[in-house]
Amino acid sequence: MKFKTLRSIVRFIMNIIADVEVVGLEKLPQGNLMLASNHLGRLDTAVLLYAVDREDIIMAVAEKYKDHPLFGAIGRAVDAIWLNRFEADFGALREILARMQKGGLMVIAPEGTRSKTEALQKAKMGAAFLAGKSGYPVLPVALTGTEDRGVLENLKKFRRSKIKVVTGNLFTVDLPKGRGREEAMQNATDEIMCQIAANLPEKYRGFYKDYPRVRELEQN
């Protein structure tokens, strides 16, 4: 299925099952970019596809969704990189970097998997590594209302879910070579997640709720 056709279908379905509010996506520039978002539920990918009006998407998707009727179709439409989440998939990482070198919009969830607590989990350092290695600027995106539990409950009651997409400010990740690199990656990971947390309601902030950087970003 062609990407435009699939996106039209996704948008049609989303308009039926959800009321999606998109804030600040005018900050999404053309050119090379990493969009980093929190991961609340299975609808996250569909919501981003609904909200983002670009076709040059680079996306890694867990292999378990390869044969899924919706998420498998999305993965094939964006020529997704199928990722083994249960081991260090260096082949997939090399392919992601190769795609990023060609240019596009990298979409990634730094947490790596859906949150079981419906709030931010401690993120992995993959997004910061890819941003630093590629030179892609990072655009943090905060999602609310896509929790599986809430979406399913609303579907059962024929109610539309209230979903919100809030875009933060673009920033770059600089990683030194050699000594101090791992610490810099951790700091960059924390910055990405704090930028996301600052645009989330308190109950969604989870692991990052007490980070001083979140309060600092809120006041700016």
Image (cartoon, rainbow, N blue to C red):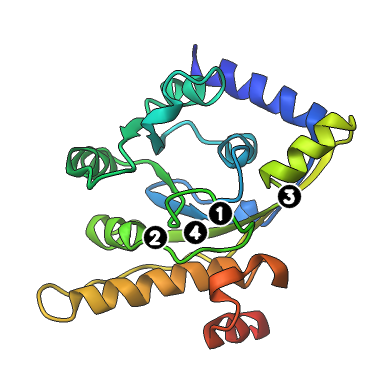
Residue 115: image tag? 1
Q: Is mark 1 on a helix, strand or loop?
A: loop
The residue indicated by pointer 2 is 137
Percent from the top left, x then y, of residue 18?
Answer: 79, 36
Kindly report the distance in space between the C-alpha atoms of the residues bearing marks 2 and 4.
Answer: 7 Å
Count how many numbered circles sit on residues in the image.
4
Disc 3 vs disc 4: Cβ atoms closer than 8 Å?
no
Q: Residue visible at 63% across and 52% down?
A: 26
The residue indicated by pointer 3 is 145
Residue type at mark 3: give it: Gly
- Tell which circle, 3 or 1, labels the residue nearer the N-terminal end: 1
In the rendered structure, the answer to whether residue 159 lies left or right of residue 202 reads: right
Residue type at mark 2: give it: Pro
Q: Is mark 2 on a helix, strand or loop?
A: loop
Q: Please say if 212 is above or below 193.
A: below
The residue indicated by pointer 4 is 139
Disc 2 vs disc 4: Cβ atoms closer than 8 Å?
yes
Quarter of the image holding residue 153? top right
The crowd level at tag 1 (other Cα within 10 Å; few <14, some 14-19, many 20+) is some
Percent from the top left, x then y, of residue 17?
Answer: 79, 31
Residue 76: image tag? none
- Tell which circle, 1 or 4, labels the residue nearer the N-terminal end: 1
Kindly report the distance in space between the C-alpha atoms of the residues bearing marks 3 and 4.
Answer: 20 Å
